[in-house]
Amino acid sequence: MSYEYLKFGKEEKDFIAKIEEISGQNIYSCYQCGKCSAGCAFSDKMDRSVSQLIHLIQIGQKEKVLKSNTHWVCSSCLTCTVRCPREIDVAALMEAVREYSLREDYEKVIISEISKEALDKLPNIALVSNFRKKTG
Amino acid sequence: MVQYSYFPGCNLKTNAKGFEETAIAVSKKLNAELVEMPNWNCCGTVHTLTSDNIMKRIAPIRVLSRSRKHIETLEESQNQVVTLCSMCNSTLKIVNNEVKKDQEILDKINYQLEEDEETYEPDMEVKHFLEILRDTIGYEKISEKVVNPLEGLKISPYYGCMLLHPEEAKIDDEEMPDVLESLVESLGAELVMSPLFKFCCGSYHIVDQEIIVSSQVEKIVEAAKQRGANALVLACPLCAYNIDQQQKAMAKNTAGKSPIPVFYFTQLMAIAMGEPVKINHFNDHFINPEPLLKELGLIGRKKAK
């Protein structure tokens, strides 16, 4: 078994504080039961499960968190939020990670690259909600 | 006639015209008319989950403030704004709750609304039309109006996420809802229960990650079909688009798939209550429900004879 030494300095603590500020949640409320990951409709498409991502936030691993696809696969269906036994708004944590990354680099979806045909075909609510979630 | 201030939201005017027209038709029949509010704007479709972004909360409050003015012109109206789209319902409800609790946010939003000469006093209630049907009208009155019971339709209710989540916006129990079930039964259709009744369809990922949506839709439809359903009923124009359109796309790729049509709950009510078929706008559907309805003798019966 190999070990990885983790840094836990100012940068890590700042990251945790920012995620807590944006989401309004206490990240250390989570005791890693895994209920969010178990009920998530998208677990099979995530490279890290929701509870794993939360654990990485708890230990301030900003790079690993932002490199995951977890928060981008999350569609804010809020199943985790209504089921969390610690009453954490888990979806708000996912939103906070999205917002954190959008506030640095504001285009996850580049609107000008979407074809005119797709724009005509897709329902307005799909476009509006997509741009609200994936552009800063 | 009791009248309700009705907020349509964008999609009821584009992809989901059949949803709106059938809802208005049945609302008149049930003595609870939906009257469209003037001057409405998009509610924002998804509620922001951030705690520090007030910008994204202004649009729903503007809607509520205008609806409040609209109510003064209506008959026998309470302070209620009614929605059909489940995304609008959830967005409006959550922000309405927030400003009821937090005067500071309300003041900041009202300061922004001053430019439009609006201010919002948080005394409105947001209701989904399903809540009106269940709590105010009642299933008994609905079944009294049924002239064309939906015999032969085996319907699986699909709630999607936004009717049941989060706590502040849910219209029924989040794990064991029964509002769509009771409605389907009161229209004379057979009920098929599926465990994936609130398994997210992939929502807005349809814009840039279609593969997520197709995988979700496949699971949802398969679960319903395996249990014998020949149609789905739902209340969200985005779920409807995703499930309807993805089934068509899948049927092209994989042999042997038999897609099942998707209905808005008001379309089923309109058919059961004998409203004209054209208000359903079935030609906007990707999987046309008309062949199934004709096969079961639920529409076009006169022509057949």
Image (cartoon, rainbow, N blue to C red):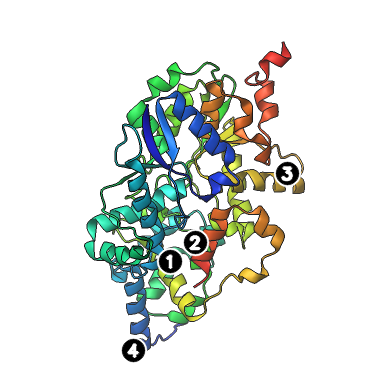
Question: Are the residues at dot 3 and dot 2 in contact (C-beta closer than 8 Å)?
Answer: no
Q: Position of residue A45 (x, y in %)?
A: 56, 61
**Crowdedness of circle 4 by 10 Å Cα count: few (<14), some, many (20+)?**
few
Q: Position of residue B108 (x, y in %)?
A: 29, 67
Residue type marked 2: Cys
Residue type marked 4: Lys
Query: Mark 4 or 2 closer to N-term?
Result: 4
What whole-number distance in Å separates the C-alpha atoms at marks 3 and 4? 54 Å
- Asked if residue A136 shows in the view, the reply is yes
Residue type marked 3: Ala
Query: Label for residue A14?
Result: none
- Vertical arrangement, residue A22 with respect to residue B22, above or below: below
Same chain under badges 1 and 2? The reply is: yes
Callout 1: chain: A
- Asked if residue B166 shows in the view, the reply is no
Question: Are the residues at dot 1 and dot 2 in contact (C-beta closer than 8 Å)?
Answer: yes
What whole-number distance in Å separates the C-alpha atoms at marks 3 and 2? 26 Å
Query: Mark 1 or 4 closer to N-term?
Result: 4
**Residue hosting label 1:** A94
Query: Label for residue B251?
Result: 3
Callout 2: chain: A
Query: Label for residue A10?
Result: 4
Q: Position of residue B277 (x, y in %)?
A: 62, 27
Callout 4: chain: A
Q: Residue at x 63, y 54 (%)?
A: A122
Query: Label for residue A74?
Result: 2
What whole-number distance in Å separates the C-alpha atoms at marks 1 and 2? 7 Å
